[in-house]
Structures are given as structure tokens and as C-alpha cells.
Amino acid sequence: MAGDYVLVVNPHAGVGRAASMVRAVCAKLHIEPDTAIETSLAPSFAERLAAAVRTAANPVTVISVGGDGTLSIIVNALADPRAVRLAIVPAGSGNDFGVALGIRSLDQALEAAAGARAADVDLGTCNGRRFINCIGMGLDGEIARTAAAIRRRGLARGMSYYCAALLGLWRVRSVRAVLTTATGEMRIDDLLMLTVGNGAWYGGGYHGAPGASLDDGELDCYAFADLKSPMRRLALMERVRRGTHPSHPVVTGFKTSSLHADFDRELAMHVDGELTSAARVDIGVLRAALSIAIL
């Protein structure tokens, strides 16, 4: 396609797998490897990315070589995500957003990046931060925190998430929560977990938001009341993996374009895998806020 490419890479993604993928991307799309920009949470990354986009010929395609966390860093660094087309090269350990788009391999990623097709997808916002895929609070947040620690020991993402889930079954306590959506309010005295999905998958293959669509202007949300038994919690997490949890009696599912949540204490949470905590959360949708390369 006409225009220029801006290559962004997380060199640590997929336990170093991104480096070999960069070589393939550069060879296929005729990009100079030394022009690649490495991701960082520092303000200098946003400045470098903005400068590269500004000097590139339109239309500009920003190529993300990494996982969902890399994508999230990029969409938060861009002043206006709609000003570019974003192409995904799935080099992370999870790549759940790529799965939602039907991009599961390097060959598919290169085909999409080299082509001219694009789809407009939604972005979410959480306390002012953009997210592409999902938020997990409570048990889900604690699992993400524990899984990150396990991954630092070298275990793959899908297995680390499962091992962390087993640990979380014993540790996490429920909270009182007030959830205010676009259509009303609900109170849950024993909330165990709250998940919010823009995309349908997270955690390296968990089908946590099976009703989610990337372009419907709504988020797919699930509030889980507590199950006191660790074995019952384990069975429920297995249903989350398969995407059959919406029919469970302790699960309340709803779609909304906005969500305000108040908890009676700070909860562990992840936003596209980035770990944080909060006692109050404001979540919204940016409709058709991102143009993404598709097959």
C-alpha cells in the first residue's frame, strides 16, 4: 500500500521472540531495522513515536510487534489513534486481541500490514487511560499480579495465568460494590471479581467476555458474586476459560457504554495486563477510535 510504516517493537515480548519477527517484518515490508522504536512507559517514547508519525508519508501504518501490552502502550502514546492505521504482529505471550481480529500467525499479520484493508474498532477508557482489550478487578486482578510474578520465572503466559488462578482461589476476599451503568445501579455485597471486555479473550486464551464485539460501542461486563469454596471457585474459573460462565447463577452479565464502580476497599486490577489498584473506577467507550489492519 502507499504511505509509510512506523515500526514499534517490545524487544522483551514473547521471551525475546519479537526480535526474530522484526527481521521478518523488515524484509517483507522493506523497512530499515534501525528505524524501529522500542516501547517504553517513559514520556520519551510518546515523543519518539509522534516524531516518526509526523515525518512519515500518509497514510501511516504503525506496526506493533509485541503482545496486547505493547498495543496498549502504543494507543496511549498516540495523541490521536485515529490518525494512523495500526497493524498487529503477534509476538507476545498472549496475543488475545489478535485472536479477536483473526490474526493468529506472522504470515497473517504481514498480509494484513501490507494490504490496504482496515476496520474501525472501539477503545475503552479506564480512569482516563485507554485500553484495547480488557479490565479485570478483584480475583482477576490478583491473578494477573501473581501471573506476572510467575512469568518472571520463565513460565509461559497461559500456564502462568492458570497457576496464578489456582493460588488466587485461596487468597482473595470479596468486597462490597456499587456498580452504576448507563441504565441503572446494582449493589453486590460479596463481589469476588468484575471483568470488563472490549475484546472477547484475555489471559492467554481465557474466553472471559464471550459476548464482546470490538465495534458495537459497548463493553461486555461480568460481575461474580463470591463462592466460599476454593473448589467451587476453581470450577467457575474453568468455565471462564471456556466462556460458559455467563449462565452460572453467581454471575451477572451486562452490556454498557459506561460503568462506574465503587468498592469498599482498594482492589487489585489489571488494565490490558498493566497492574494497578483502585477503590473507584470510571470506565467508558470511545466508539470507532482505532483503525486496525485486517485480512
Image (cartoon, rainbow, N blue to C red):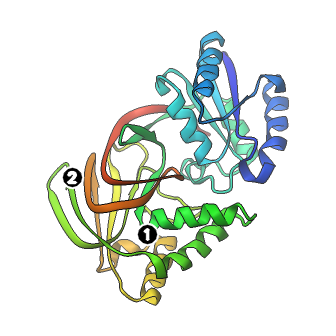
Quick one: label 1 or label 2, which is nearer the N terminus? 1
Residue at x 66%, y 67% (from the top left corner): 150
Residue at x 14%, y 55% (from the top left corner): 184
Residue extending farthest front: 265
Residue 285: image quadrant is top left
Tell me if residue 225 can be seen.
yes
Q: Please tell me how many numbered marks the rendered image carries.
A: 2
Between the residue at mark 1 and the residue at mark 2, the CA separation in whole angstroms equals 21 Å
Q: Viewer-nearest of labels 1 and 2?
A: 1
Camera-side residue of 99 and 178: 178
Camera-side residue of 218 and 152: 152
Q: Position of residue 42 (x, y in %)?
A: 60, 31
The residue pinned by badge 1 equals 139
> Label 1 sits on what residue type?
Leu
Quadrant assignment for the C terminus: top right
Secondary structure category for the residue under label 2: strand
Q: Is residue 28 left or right of residue 95?
A: right
Tell me if residue 1 can be seen.
no
Which circle marks residue 237 in the picture? none
Q: Position of residue 290 (x, y in %)?
A: 47, 32
Quadrant assignment for the N terminus: top right
Residue 57: image quadrant is top right
Residue extending farthest left: 184
Q: Is residue 290 left or right of residue 263?
A: right
Secondary structure category for the residue under label 1: helix
> Label 2 sits on what residue type?
Thr
Residue at x 59%, y 53% (from the top left corner): 99
The residue pinned by badge 2 equals 181
